[in-house]
Amino acid sequence: MLKPFLIMLCLIMFVPFSYAQKKKLDSLNAKQIIDTLLIDRELKNWSIRLFTNYKGQSFNLRNGENKLSFKPNNRAGVGVGLGTSKLIVDVAFNLKGLEENPTERFDLQGAVIVGNNHLVGLYIQHYKGFNVTSNFGEPEFFSSDITSFSMGVNYLHTFDEISFSTATLRAGLMKAEKKHYISYGVGGFMIYDNFSANDALIPDRDFFDSEAYINEFKGVGVGVSAGVLSVFVLPANFFVTLNVIPGIGLMHKRTFTEEDKHTVSNPLIYKLDYNAGVGYVYKRFYVTFVYGSGVYTSSLDHGLDYVFSNTKAKIAIGYKLNSKKKLKLPFEGK
């Protein structure tokens, strides 16, 4: 029932929406556009942040009830950041500790509110080294030669302004004019995904089709999405948030074995982005906890389904600057 629902929701809500914003920006030069869309000049909206986070890119290969799971090690990190009403920049450092089999990784993720109606997200991830588990009796092991490279862009245009949004709350800027904020939107996404290993990723057993014993996958896809962003302000300076954005798209997919390569016949992909959070604001301090994931699934033929998951969680403690001054940029005249 889920797949038909996603198809109907995305196709009904995907309508033209860019003309109004383009008209507003056409009369501005490049410096003015950057200033208008990305820069918060009110220093009282700025905050310094300390956080701990969890990032868990993983993927599964499924054949009916049989499942192989590939998950990285050392998924926790700590970091510092800077928050404003328009942009949050967090820099995290991965904690490897005494992990016997550390996963090598590069993981860049971020999101920005452009103008008042545009939410843009980006991720670039390169992971090497995964734990491999199954639900059919194979022993768990760590494979250092499994490599995953993924990148994607997500875009959502909301019908109502989102200058007050989940991102604003994550920067500790809670407003109390309303008890809840709900905004619907439509947009799209682009994905590139590649995973590979020196040998076949599937054990030589009878749980999968013999044609599914792949050692590499490559896919590039585009799609449409639609969803809802919501914020609920609670008593005593608490708030909760929930965002849900399903999508559907087309992907050109190829799988590789040691002897052959195969172009996947079914191009459809089904995507779901979601995140939830809770926070508390006290004077110039704030604490937030957010959890979310971006998941997509697609067929690789021969009874094999691929499920990619980009899960993340973060606890942040912030301190807002106490300044009534306005930011002055270097390129501005005196």
Image (cartoon, rainbow, N blue to C red):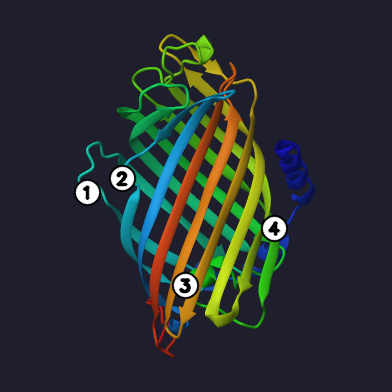
Reading the image, the residue beneath label 1 is 97
Reading the image, the residue beneath label 3 is 171
The residues tagged by marks 3 and 4 sit, at their Cα atoms, a distance apart of 22 Å
The residues tagged by marks 4 and 2 sit, at their Cα atoms, a distance apart of 35 Å
Q: Where on the picture, by quarter, is residue 139?
A: top left
- Marks 3 and 1 in Cβ contact (< 8 Å): no
- Asked if one can make out residue 167 in the rendered structure from this viewpoint, the answer is yes
What residue lies at 60% left-to-right and 76% top-to-bottom? 234
Pointer 3 or 1: first along the chain: 1
In depth, the one of 134 and 73 nearer the eye is: 134
Q: Amino acid at mark 2?
A: Asn
Is residue 293 found left or right of 327 in the rendered image?
right
Q: Residues within 10 Å of mark 2 (few under 14, many from 20)?
A: many
Is residue 139 found left or right of 184 in the rendered image?
left
In depth, the one of 227 and 232 nearer the eye is: 232
Reading the image, the residue beneath label 4 is 185
Picture coordinates of residue 195 (x, y %)? 42, 29
Reading the image, the residue beneath label 2 is 74
**Label 1: element kind:** loop
What residue lies at 31% left-to-right and 45% top-to-bottom? 74
